[in-house]
Image: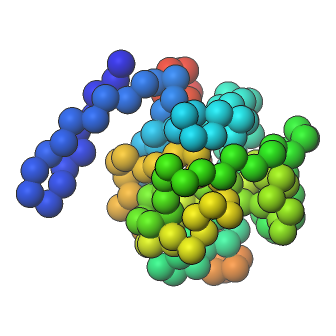
Amino acid sequence: MMAISISGIAQAEEVALDPENTLNLYLKDDGLVVIKLRPDLAPKHVARLKTLAREKFYDGIVFHRVIPDFMAQTGDPTGTGTGSSDYPDVRAEFTNKASFGKAGILGMARSQHPDSANSQFFITLDDASFLDRNYTIFGEVVSGMNYVNTIAVGEPPANPDKIIKMRVAADPQD
């Protein structure tokens, strides 16, 4: 197990992370965003993200849709919002056991069809609980939200930020 200390306003909380279910998302300026995956909520989506991270699919992909006080979306290899991986789409894994009710929740982007998630995902920047039970929640930022909050805004941004690399914490971080 890997332990990470997360500072709160009044106190520090120790969170034990399973390296096999933790993603390290590297952004500009040495920004490390640590993501706790939730296979208990969305096992198929977590498996897809880990597969793509291990294949280095996300390396260099831009944040193509960033809406202030809502979310930052990435995972499209074309950078247009219409692309995906070569894998088949993943069936929805909606839940009532978690909520998009705060910043730092990760969800799978999709088309209007609920079973169309593939490689695109988003990170909430604020309360987005209106998405509850309509989009699959697969993880949560546990460290580095300060870096997420600096991602360039736009649909698409004029000069989009990109994922430098994304790795499963249990794997080499090359």
Instruction: Name the outermost residue toward the left.
Output: 10
Q: Residue at x 14, y 60 (%)?
A: 9
Instruction: Name the outermost residue toward the front.
Output: 96
Q: Is residue 31 visible?
A: yes
Position of 139 with respect to 17 (left or right) is right
Q: Quadrant of the C terminus?
A: top right
Q: Is residue 134 above or below residue 34?
A: below
Of residue 108 and residue 67, the one placed in the foreground of this image is 108
Position of 126 with respect to 3 (left or right) is right
Q: Residue at x 56, y 70 (%)?
A: 71
Q: Position of residue 148 (x, y in %)?
A: 46, 61
Q: Quadrant of the N terminus?
A: top left
Q: Quadrant of residue 15?
A: top left
Q: Quadrant of residue 44?
A: top right
Q: Position of residue 79 (x, y in %)?
A: 78, 63
Of residue 162 and residue 121, the one placed in the foreground of this image is 121
Q: Position of residue 139 (x, y in %)?
A: 52, 46
Q: Position of residue 54 (x, y in %)?
A: 67, 28
Q: Is residue 89 above or below residue 43?
A: below
